[in-house]
């Protein structure tokens, strides 16, 4: 991206709701990264509704796991975030703006961890569906261009998810016009580096331990082959392309 348009974007992120002052450090960091942050979402700092019934993902992910994961973990990140930003200009920012304004800033580590985990889980639930789906023609063409086959993409995604050491996430992203598979640790996500996440698999143990115990590979295999929401990934690809 041209440096002028990058500056323009960063300024537009920074001025929202008096964020300009607080986002100063982020501006410098974002300008150093290879691409400007590119957002296709503007989400409130509140827990969104689950897009399916709690038992809809069984047997790959049980209703009990969904209940704990959504009502305790995901909800908890929003509760913590609300306490951390209360009374600051970040309280009125979108969830994505909070992630960008805190990424890489050691003084805002707790804010980043909770905002990013809230955002990552928003996309995680949107990345799953009990309904079998397939990529749109446009996304399928990009998959053929960048991975040759859908099976090759799924295999790379499985490798990233299973191979992530400790807690983290495996993502399909659009990065500089190219589809890529990436893994991140803990709360980290690809937003601050300018990539647009299309779908994500949670590989924290809380995502599968009640159902699969240590068998992350079985959870990942079930998610990839039975639950991925390609309709939603296609919508995000169309918005980002
Ligand atoms: Fe999780």
Image (spheres, helix red, strand yellow):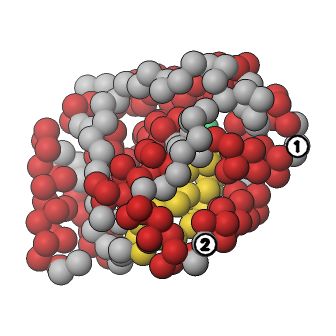
- Residue 141: % across, % down: 44, 71
Circle 1 sits on which residue?
214
Residue extending farthest to the front is: 137
Q: Say whether residue 208 is visible.
A: yes
Q: Is 160 left or right of 9, judged from the image as shown?
A: right
Question: Mark 2 packing: few (<14 Cα in 10 Å), some, or many (20+)?
Answer: some
Q: Is mark 1 within 8 Å of ligand 1?
A: no
Residue at 30% over, 31% down: 44
Residue at 63% over, 24% down: 56
Q: Is 15 left or right of 39, judged from the image as shown?
A: left
Q: Is mark 2 within 8 Å of ligand 1?
A: no
Identify whether 94 is placed above or below 136. Answer: above
Q: Secondary structure at mark 2?
A: loop
Identify whether 134 is placed above or below 111. Answer: below
User: Which mark is on residue 149?
Assistant: 2
Identify whether 169 is placed above or below 119. Answer: below
Within the image, what quadrant is residue 195 found in? bottom left
Q: Considering the image in quadrants, where does the C terminus appear?
A: bottom left
Quadrant of ligand 1: it is: top right
Q: Considering the image in quadrants, where does the N terminus appear?
A: bottom left
Q: Secondary structure at mark 1?
A: loop
- Residue 118: % across, % down: 47, 36
For marks 2 and 1, the one nearer the N-term is 2
Residue at 45% over, 46% down: 231
Identify whether 134 is placed above or below 194. Answer: above
- Residue 73: % across, % down: 60, 27
Marks 2/1 in contact by CB < 8 Å: the verdict is: no
Mark 2–mark 1 Cα distance, whole angstroms, equals 30 Å
Q: Say whether residue 124 is visible.
A: no
Q: Nearer the viewer, residue 211 or 133?
A: 133
Residue extending farthest to the right is: 214
């Amino acid at each position: 991206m041209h440096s002028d348009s990058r500056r323009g974007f960063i300024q537009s992120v920074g001025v929202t709701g008096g964020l300009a002052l607080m986002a100063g450090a982020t501006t410098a960091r974002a300008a150093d990264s290879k691409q400007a942050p590119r957002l296709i979402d503007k989400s409130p700092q509140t827990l969104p509704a689950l897009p399916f019934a709690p038992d809809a993902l069984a047997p790959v992910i049980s209703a009990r796991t969904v209940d704990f994961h959504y009502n305790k973990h995901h909800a908890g990140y929003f509760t913590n975030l609300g306490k951390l930003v209360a009374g600051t200009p970040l309280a009125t920012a979108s969830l994505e703006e909070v992630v960008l304004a805190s990424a890489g800033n050691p003084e805002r580590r707790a804010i980043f961890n909770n905002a990013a985990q809230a955002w990552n889980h928003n996309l995680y639930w949107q990345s799953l569906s009990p309904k079998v789906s397939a990529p749109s023609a446009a996304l399928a063409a990009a998959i053929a261009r960048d991975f040759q086959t859908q099976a090759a993409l799924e295999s790379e995604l499985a490798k990233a998810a299973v191979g992530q050491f400790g807690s983290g996430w495996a993502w399909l992203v659009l990065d500089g016009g190219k589809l890529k598979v990436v893994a991140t640790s803990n709360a980290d996500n690809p937003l601050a580096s300018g990539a647009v996440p299309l779908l994500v698999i949670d590989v924290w143990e809380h995502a599968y331990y009640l159902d699969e115990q240590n068998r992350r590979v079985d959870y990942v295999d079930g998610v990839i082959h039975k639950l991925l929401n390609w309709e939603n990934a296609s919508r995000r690809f169309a918005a980002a392309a």
